[in-house]
């Protein structure tokens, strides 16, 4: 027989100054090696309609700061009011099959578990600002996909063009005057002797 008791008193005092609160850092957006560890089919019923979707839990396997972190992905499979949601979901389902090398018909989604893939993680923001930002899987590629691995390299910054040296401006009458000299066309005509570079005969 199990006995339960209720009280308002803790078995020992709790000191909030000695404890650390919960915190959750998002995985930065980018490509990661990962595998599915949980795969289930869920049924949804909302004001927007009803349907079925895949709920996938991915575990990052790539060595680094985010190894063993989890991110999630929902893939729409059926929906009674949104043809577009089904089309997008079927494309994502096809990508998942290609990434896990599955070409036969799928009836049990557990077939996708523990197959290494390359996933692109994004960050979803709540447009109404009611909920915190959260990670989501936006693309799935084969583990050795060149496209996914090339995207991991940071793009090189564009080369900087050296500044062009300023060209000296031609002197004007005002600048010439400012330098203490007189522009040639403003000088008086020299006397005849100076012009002939000779003395005037007496």
Image (cartoon, rainbow, N blue to C red):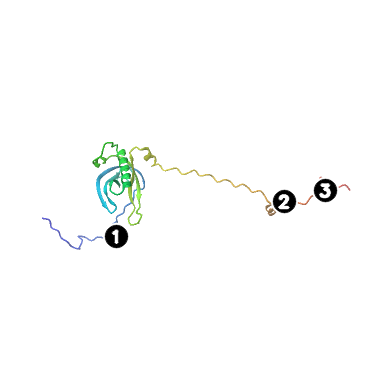
Q: Residues within 10 Å of mark 1 (few under 14, many from 20)?
A: few
User: Which circle's residue, 1 or 3, is located before the other in the chain?
Assistant: 1
Q: Which residue is mark 2?
A: 183
Total labels: the figure holds 3
Contact (Cβ within 8 Å) of mark 3 with mark 2: no
Q: Secondary structure at mark 3?
A: helix
Q: Quadrant of residue 99?
A: top left
Q: CA distance from mark 1 to mark 3?
A: 105 Å
x and y, in percent, of residue 103 in the image: 28, 36
Of discs 1 and 3, which sits in the foreground? 3
Q: Secondary structure at mark 2?
A: loop
x and y, in percent, of residue 33 in the image: 32, 41
Q: Which residue is mark 3?
A: 192
Of discs 1 and 2, which sits in the foreground? 2
Residue sitting nearer the eye, 95 or 52 = 52
Q: Secondary structure at mark 1?
A: helix
x and y, in percent, of residue 37 in the image: 26, 44
Dot label at residue 78: none
Residue at position x 33%, y 49% from top? 135
Q: Which residue is mark 1?
A: 17
Side of 43 relative to 196 (left or right)? left
């Amino acid at each position: 027989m199990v006995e339960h008791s209720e009280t308002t008193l803790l078995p020992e005092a709790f000191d909030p100054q000695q404890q650390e609160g919960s915190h959750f850092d998002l995985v930065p957006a980018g490509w990661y090696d990962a595998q599915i560890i949980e795969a289930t089919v869920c049924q949804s019923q909302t004001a927007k309609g009803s349907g079925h979707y895949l709920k996938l839990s991915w575990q990052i396997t790539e060595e680094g700061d985010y190894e063993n972190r989890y991110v999630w992905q929902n893939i729409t499979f059926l929906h009674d009011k949104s043809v577009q949601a089904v089309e997008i979901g079927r494309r994502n389902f096809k990508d998942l099959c290609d990434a896990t090398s599955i070409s036969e018909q799928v009836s049990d989604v557990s077939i996708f578990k523990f197959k290494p893939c390359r996933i692109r993680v994004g960050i979803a923001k709540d447009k109404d600002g009611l909920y915190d930002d959260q990670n989501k899987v936006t693309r799935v590629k084969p583990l050795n996909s060149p496209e996914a691995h090339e995207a991991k390299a940071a793009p090189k910054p564009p080369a900087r063009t050296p500044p062009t040296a300023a060209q000296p401006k031609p002197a004007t009458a005002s600048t010439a005057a400012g330098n203490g000299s007189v522009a040639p066309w403003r000088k008086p005509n020299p006397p005849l002797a100076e012009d002939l570079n000779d003395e005037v005969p007496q």
